[in-house]
Amino acid sequence: MTPQQLQTIQLSEKLSALEASNTIYLDLSALYDRPLHVHTKLVEHLPDNLINFINLEHLVLTGFYSLRSLSVLFSLTKLKTLELSLCDALGNEIDIQWLKKIAVLSLKVCCYSPAKPITHFEQLTQIGKLTNLTKLTIYDLTQLVSLSGIEKLTNLTELSIRSCYGLVCIDAITTLPNLTKLELLDCDSLSKLDGLILLQKISYLWLCLPRYSGSYKEITQLINLETLEIDGKVCKQLTSLNDFYKLKKLQRLSLLGGSKLLSLNGIENLLMLTELTINGCHQLKNIEALSSLDKLAELAIYDCPQLKEIKVLNSLNKLTELNIIECNAIDNIDFAQWQVPECLKKLTLYHSGNLHLFNIVKLINLTTLILIGKSRENKTTWCSIEDIGELLSVQELLLARSITIHSLKPLKKLSKLTSLNLADRQIVLVADTKKLQLQYLEYIHLTGCEQLENINVQNLLPKLIKVPIDHECQ
């Protein structure tokens, strides 16, 4: 018996053990205890008993480096989703007819070695024959230069292309009549998006193009956009959002790396906006334009070091989630000034300096609170542990180098707490948790608590499932 035959038999036996389960989702990479490449590198053909999975809808093949045929898939009439990753031998030798019923196809590094000839996957010449495809994802096909052939996929609604470093032309997608979702990420050679304006059905667009040299104004003409994420050189062109006024349907907006963005002027035209993420806009000083966004529910501001004033948040009466990360010029937040502080459900603050939180007890419906300081030498507490103990709706609590804690007794009212994470060298004494009566607590995490003197968790109810304690705790 050859090694190839032995490996195929072992794979067949693994499949036989699953037949009775009528498995709908089957990931062959999960069938092995050891690294997948050890077991599958010699398999050239999938075992015949795979046809017994008559209800199989989703199949993932990972690390089948020698696999040359997918003919067994022809009998799987309900198979709709196929993911191929690290299947190096597939390509020119594959007969695409076995995949014609597939609706969702994902390809990742199907021909990794640059020394190998360009495959049908790299050229997409055969992909165009899969006319039932509605979703196509392509990763790491480094020899892919254009999308020629993809124009035949008239039923395609979602297209994601990631880390295809040789891609220089996407003209072919402009003829796809039903495309609604497009992702172009880390395609380093792609500098222009000619014809993008023709994709008027697009509702979701995510662009990360390091060498993009076209104008962002092409994007502002896609009037049916509901989700827009732009970073890299696309975002670096922005000085304001005044040109976005046509995007009346936009609900989710993410801007990463807008180094020239001084304010959010123009965002007041996006009245349907419910989610906004601003990241790495190092010149941004003013966000007052947010005051008119009465539907905004989730706001995340990352790494905006010039931003000092956020009083505009007081007027956002639908805000349920707020994340402010590394905006270190902000020195205080007063929740008493908020019109509807009870709307906020999740609050995350990561700050490298001294931050003062006033009237945090006003956040009576807060379920998640994450406060993380950076400096271990910082002696200023953001607010008192007693104030935290008044947030009776809190279920998840993470405090790290932000609150001076001498005892956990102030938390005894937090009867809904399920997760407690303390990473703070300032903890002096943690009281016996028996007295806290945290009946829902399932998770405790203590790290870096060098002066920790007493912790007793054995009296917590059986729901406590995880108690990781860092080795630095004495």
Image (spheres, rainbow, N blue to C red):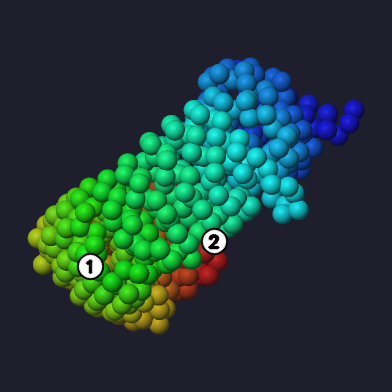
Between tags 1 and 2, which lies in front?
Answer: 2
Residue 428, horizontal then vertical, whole percent: 39, 73
286 on left or right of 109 = left
Query: For this view, does 7 lie left or right of residue 138?
Result: right
Q: Which mark is residue 443?
A: none
Residue at (69%, 47%) from the top-left corner? 118
- Picture coordinates of residue 397 (x, y %)? 33, 58
Where 325 sits versus 80, above or below? below
Residue 398 versus residue 446: which sits nearer the camera? Answer: 398
Q: Residues within 10 Å of mark 1 (few under 14, many from 20)?
A: some
Q: Is residue 291 above or below residue 171?
A: below
On screen, residue 72 versus residue 440, left or right, reads: right
Name which of mark 1 and mark 2 comes first in the sequence.
2
Image quadrant where residue 277 sits = bottom left
* Residue assigned mark 1: 264
Q: Is residue 469 above or below residue 274?
A: below
Do the numbered discs 1 and 2 sit on residues whose CB atoms are within 8 Å?
Answer: no
Distance between mark 1 and mark 2 Cα atoms:
30 Å
User: Residue type at mark 2?
Assistant: Ser
Give the image location of residue 129, x and y in percent. Answer: 56, 31
Q: Which amino acid type corresponds to the residue marked 1 in the rendered image?
A: Leu
Q: Residue at x 77, y 29 (%)?
A: 8
Q: Sort mark 2 into few (<14), some (14-19) or many (20+) by Cα contacts within 10 Å.
A: some
* Residue 222 in the image, given as x and y percentages of width and height: 30, 50
**Pointer 2 residue:** 189
In front: 420, or 1?
A: 1
User: Residue 149 appears in which quarter of the rendering?
Assistant: top right
- Residue for point 60% across, 50% down: 144
> In the structure shown, which secondary structural element does the residue marked by tag 2 occupy?
loop
